[in-house]
Image (cartoon, grey):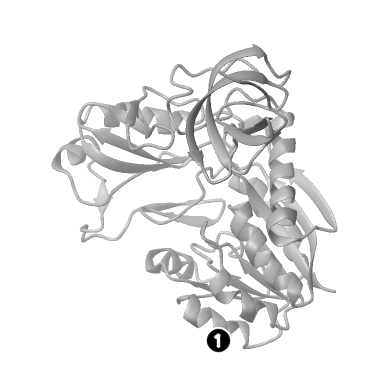
Amino acid sequence: MPTIEITSLAHGGYGVGRVEGQVWFVPYALPGDTVEASEARRTKGLVWGKVDAIPSPSPDRVQQPCPVFGSCGACTWLHFAYPAQLEWKQRIVLDTLKRLGGVVPRESSTADDPEFRYGYRTRAEFHGDGWKRGFYAESSHDIVDIALCPLCHPKLNDALALLRNASVPGAVEITVNPDGDEVLIWTAKPNRRLSKVFPNAQSFDSDNERDGFICDGVPIVNGAFSQSSLLLNRVLHARVQEALGDATSVLDLYCGNGNFTLAREGEIVGLDHNRASVGAALSLDRHDYRVGSEIDFHRVIREKAWGAILLDPPRAGALAIMSTLAQSSAQKIVYVSCDPATLARDAKVLTKEGWQLDRCTAVDMFPHTAHIESVNTFIRT
């Protein structure tokens, strides 16, 4: 059993160390730890380890407040102190940009809200088998039974308590309004037992209009994407507005419910494939939101010299439209990313066509997890 000094963190949050020149990835190990680890598995060029003992803990290792931490996959950094946790998130974004994309921003920064490091989640998908209800275990579909989660908003934990009594198998997504009483319940298929506990539960088979509520002027639609924390969405929203600056025309790609542009003035055109989200944004009668795929994105990108093009793609990134974006005549491109690796890949396309990453801001939307959001502003060199 080797003793490993953990010197850094990899994308995904794994502790990194070396044994006789061999790189080890060790889940739950932190920079500054010295751990005794056993080999769990090998992949090309890597050994994946499992912590067996920590003879010398990192100064950034703290007591964590959850009895299922280490088995539940909802968070892996609950034992990681601030401000080190946020500093490493920024470092992971910057290191990934440079290593995979050869891209270095002119400026970098971080953004978070220390008030909401716990109790911040307003949306979560809880899995159940009829007996257990909770989140999946790390890298598994085994369900870890939980009574409450320290990262979930109190209203979300209250809804989980009701859900536990329903003995409903499968996944149930719950979204709560942090400023109101609304609780949205969504499943892939209707369930009679679930409807007894939550009469407003909806699914793809529901005939009635999807439920929703307004939060910070933006429609939140049952079963459609919204940030997992409507509270920390305010931090992200502020950084996006800062990046867009005084642009008077904005093309909002992957616009969803209009999260970033509904409140802006000027010419706004938004495109997204999700009809429910686009319909909700349109219902507020503010701007021109359209249902469209990435095929449509190419055409609208070329329509004019946009003041700014904003994109917030899914985790897979936006490679399908990057060459068209790179050739656009926009004054700036603001790329909101939830995955540093696909961001680096896409940023490489832009920089090869004469764009510069002017500023990268790592936004802590998921405290106590290794997930990282970033707001990236590209300008012509």
Quarter of the picture holding the C terminus: bottom right
Question: Is 219 or 364 nearer to us in this picture?
Answer: 364
Residue at x 41%, y 38% (from the top left corner): 181
**Crowding at label 1, few (<14), some or many (≥20) Cα neighbours within 10 Å?**
few
Residue 152 visible in the current orientation: no
Quarter of the picture holding the N terminus: top right
What's the residue type where badge 1 is placed? Arg
Question: Is 333 or 105 nearer to us in this picture?
Answer: 105
Residue 106 visible in the current orientation: yes
Question: Is 183 or 165 nearer to us in this picture?
Answer: 165
Residue at x 23%, y 33% (from the top left corner): 129
Q: Which residue lies most toward the top here?
A: 55
Question: Is 101 or 147 nearer to us in this picture?
Answer: 101
Tell me the element at label 1: helix
How many badges with numbers are in the image? 1
Horizontally, is 23 left or right of 71 in the view?
A: right
In this rendering, is residue 115 above or below 43? above
Horizontally, is 136 left or right of 107 in the view?
A: left
Horizontally, is 108 left or right of 291 in the view?
A: right
Horizontally, is 201 left or right of 122 in the view?
A: left
Residue 241: where, in percent of width, then height? 71, 59
The residue labelled by disc 1 is 299
Residue at x 14%, y 42% (from the top left corner): 192
Residue 249: where, in percent of width, then height? 69, 77
Residue at x 73%, y 83% (from the top left corner): 329
Residue 98: where, in percent of width, then height? 75, 55
Q: Which residue lies most toward the left here?
A: 192
In this rendering, is residue 258 above or below 196? below
